[in-house]
Image (cartoon, rainbow, N blue to C red):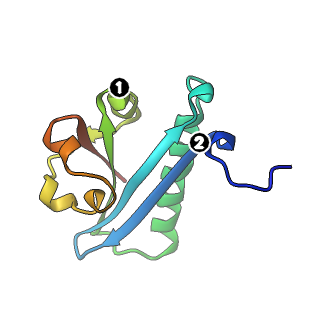
Amino acid sequence: MDTKFSFSNITSILIYHKTKSSQFVKYYVLILGTHKRFRKFGYGKLILDEFVEFVQKSKKNKNTNLDIKIKILLKSVDSSLNFYLNYGFVISSDTLNTNRLFYKYEPETDLKENKEKILELLI
């Protein structure tokens, strides 16, 4: 049994941050990845399916105001874009200024240089 944390022992990982406003509950996916040796086996879809189910259940369990929209937002590099689009995400019309949370953890230059796109999934 391993007693130390090591990214090499992780199949997939998803880390998110939740924010609330009067109009939206937003789940920002800060990290979503699958170890290279486990790609193309469905682990990315599986972890995303579980996360979407978690968000849907929390909407039902919290007696959330039904008028409030729930969004899952993430940044995607071009090489992963089709995976998310095929899953049902769309390229967000939100701008850099409305999603500053992403850049609390990563530099803004990737999005400014068109290396990454912000995607959203409305729940």
Q: Residue at x 48, y 75 (%)?
A: 62
Q: Residues within 10 Å of mark 2 (few under 14, many from 20)?
A: some
Instruction: From this view, report whether residue 21 is shown above or below residue 55.
Output: below
Task: Give percent across and percent down for residue 9.
Answer: 69, 42
Amino acid type, residue under disc 2 in the picture: Ser
Q: Disc 1 residue type?
A: Ser
Q: Mark 2 points at which residue?
A: 12
Most extreme residue toward the top is 40
Residue 50: percent from the left, percent from the top?
A: 57, 49
* Residue under pointer 1: 79
- Disc 1 residue crowd, few under 14, some 14–19, many 20+, Cα 10 Å: few
Task: Answer with left or right where residue 80 lies relative to residue 78.
Answer: right
Q: Which is nearer the eye, 98 or 62?
A: 98
In this rendering, the answer to whether 66 lies above or below 108 is below
Q: Which residue is drawn at 37% across and 30% down?
A: 80
Q: Distance between the residues labelled 2 and 1?
A: 17 Å
- Seen from the viewer's position, the closer of residues 86 and 36 is 36
81 relative position to 23: left or right:
right
Residue 8, given in percent of the width and then of the height, sits at 65, 40
Q: Residue at x 58, y 29 (%)?
A: 42
Q: Is 91 situated left or right of 13 in this image?
A: left
N-terminal label among 2 and 1: 2
Q: In which quarter of the image is residue 119?
A: top left
Are the residues tagged 2 and 1 within 8 Å (C-beta)?
A: no
Q: Residue at x 50, y 40 (%)?
A: 33
Picture quadrant of residue 7: top right
Q: Which of 51 and 65 is in front in this view?
A: 51
Q: In which quarter of the image is the C terminus?
A: bottom left
